[in-house]
Image (cartoon, grey):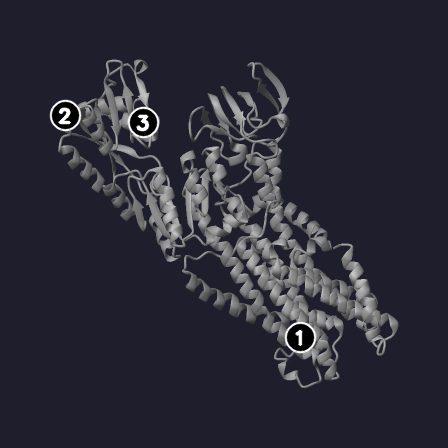
Amino acid sequence: MPTSTRVLFPRMPRGPRQERRYLERPRQQGLVRRAVLEAFRKLDPRQAVGNPVMFVVWCGTALCLALTLEPRLLDAQAGAEERSFNALISLTLLATLLFANFAEALAEGRGKAQADALRRTQARTQARRQLADGSIELVDSSDLRRGDLVLVQGGDVIPADGEVIAGVASVDESAITGESAPVLKEAGSDVAGSVTGGTRILSDQLTLRITADPGKGFIDRMIALVEGAERSKTPNEIALTVLLAVLTQVFLIAVATLSPVAGFLQKAPSVVTLVALLVALIPTTIGGLLSAIGIAGMDRVAQFNVIATSGRAVEACGDVNTLVLDKTGTITLGNRLAEEFLPVGGHNVAELAEVALGASCFDQTPEGRSIVRLAEKLGAALPFAAADASGIDFSARTRMSGSDTPDGSEFRKGAVDAIKGFVRSRGGPVPDQLDQCFEQVSRLGGTPLAVCRSAEVFGVIYLKDIIKPGIRERFDQLRRMGIRTVMLTGDNPITAGVIAREAGVDDFIAEATPEDKIAVIQQEQKLGKLVAMTGDGSNDAPALAQANVGVAMNSGTQTAKEAANMVDLDSDPTKLIDIVTIGKQLLITRGALTTFSIANDIAKYFAILPALFAGVGLEALNVMRLASPQSAILSAMVFNALIIPALVPLALKGVKFRPLSAEQLLRRNLLVYGAGGVVAPFVGIKLIDLAIGALRLI
Amino acid sequence: MRFWLPLLLVAGTLLLAPLFRNSQPPLQSHSLALLLCGTTALSVYLFAVIAQPEKF
């Protein structure tokens, strides 16, 4: 059972470093112990064969171990004294394999820990299934099928994913989101109408229609994803695997043909030395860390409480060119507040406040409540009995909401154009002053809401939009990375333009309908751009599916979550920017470590080649002045092994993200990881050689 | 493959071993032949990875 601290995906710790270390230590120790055991299990050749570079090292290790047991296996002239050198090389190669396996196991372990926590929410429960005749039968949650009707009451664990078809209830979703505040679920609501199996209903009751068969629910899919069961190689990973396999193939052929060439020089090297040369030349560093980098990328997204349906989605984030963002909640704070009433048509503020109160009394949105608060503050009273009136919900089509009273009065508030149309349709006049107020509010970057009662316009409510702090700097960063931002808003073009300028977005689409979202995405994709967007409603589903990276809010509908390739458990649309940053970081880390790995070869070449051909005039290549040929080979192998665990933290944490263009990043990568990759092994191999000499290992 | 790979390695070793018989005793000639077959198999495996990377 979940404990009181049921946070499965703890947010990125922001406390002091020491406190974070203290809190994470027990978890880390458990992960490390499991990763060590897993590293040995991964020595199984059936698993090793999945990584071409490390499988070549595996074969080399097996050969060296055989030659340790019987040094004369391949050469009858070989002496027993070679046994200790062969043993040292074998152990170093074995350590290389174990370190690479450890890196992968550590990355996988973090995902498995999350999966274990999720699995605990999946305890089988009894469910009340409603039969066709209306009777209720108790069944095991595993017997529920898609389409079944289920009754859940306060205190029950919701047995499977479903949509609410009747009732209103508050649901504790902390088992999934880590957020303790209950969430209201009700029938007929687009966004609040879906529930997730494993969450707990706190009060009241709901009738659900089950939407997923056993084993195919949201949590099941999350477990499979974080465990890596469904992790297939991403396009970039496949391309890099091919590059590494080609390099390995080239070096394998070169080293295999070296023996007869060396034999021609009367200097045939031992097979163990050739294996060492091969392992030193093939890109073992990136080969050993490649899968760990990918898994860690997924894990970093999960730490942000975002579930990616595939590594491909995370990677696509790194290539995104265009971000399509909703204004409200992403660029501006979600709650716009009523700031002022601007009366028109000879009405005064008090009259406008009274009609605005009448139009907003059924509006439970933060904006609606703020209008009610402002009107009441100005002394307005509701001009009708709320119990006798009926509320009119806002819709994207009508772009207004309000209430109808039994005496036939229609109180409405909404977009100025929509109210104008409404008033005209009822034969009323539209005062010119309305347009002036509209422009006045729009120029301030606010949202003007016109207010009318039946055929009479009363004025405009100034809804103040507050741009999120720091958002302009984030957009500046994105621009430097070559990412274009497009803001979508239902606001009029003047308001949208003011907010777009203040927030620093590159483009905006005003008076946008849900259909506009998909049109913008398609237009950008036709230009060869990769597009990311967020959404929560069923009407967002086509656009989420169309976008290269679609992030659905967990509070959204099941349809939206199924269409998207990521789900944000915190339902925070701003996270799209963080997700793109993680995707970029994943690609940068992979590129940086590949550069480092290939650059490493140069120093190892200068260590092993003079040792291989000692005595035939290649001594000049021994620029590091290594003690002996055997010490040189062993030093290169030890460095080759140690560099993998040394880079594990970087592979798991990711290279520090910098908002630079692709060209600047490439230049920086080449300088830091290319030049660093060339210099570091020279220093490292020399130090190891000195240590081997001091310890008299050879 | 689990059945055919060892069989191919054994067959290759037996076929190639006579090539080393002139310079090496029987154990070493067979080991060298096995090493040659193993290296070839490894090379074929790498070609397979290059051709169908998504399968590995």
Identity of the residue furthest to the right in this view: B26
Q: Is residue B4 placed above or below A203 in the rendered structure?
A: below
Picture residue at 72% right of the left edge, 74% below the top: A630
Q: Amino acid at mark 3?
A: Arg
In screen coordinates, is A182 left or right of A641? left
**Chain holding disc 3:** A
Task: Inspect this view and state whether residue A91 appears.
Answer: no
Mark 1 Cα-neighbour bin, 10 Å: few <14, some 14–19, many ≥20 = many
Q: Nearer the viewer, residue A206 or A635?
A: A206
Q: Quadrant of residue A624?
A: bottom right
Q: Amino acid at mark 2?
A: His
Q: Amino acid at mark 1?
A: Ile
**Chain holding disc 1:** A
- The residue at which mark 2 appears reads as A347
Picture residue at 53% right of the left edge, 41% below the top: A10
Distance between the Cα atoms at labels 1 and 3? Answer: 76 Å
Q: Nearer the viewer, residue A16 or A149?
A: A149
Picture residue at 46% right of the left edge, 33% below the top: A557
Distance between the Cα atoms at labels 3 and 2? Answer: 23 Å
Counting residues from the N terminus, which is met first, the one under dot 3 or under dot 2?
Answer: 2
Question: In the image, which disc is placed on residue A369?
Answer: 3
Counting residues from the N terminus, which is met first, the one under dot 1 or under dot 2?
Answer: 2
User: Whole-percent x and y of residue A50?
Assistant: 66, 55
User: Whole-percent x and y of residue A656?
Assistant: 48, 57
Mark 2 Cα-neighbour bin, 10 Å: few <14, some 14–19, many ≥20 = few
Location of the N terminus of chain A (image quadrant): top right
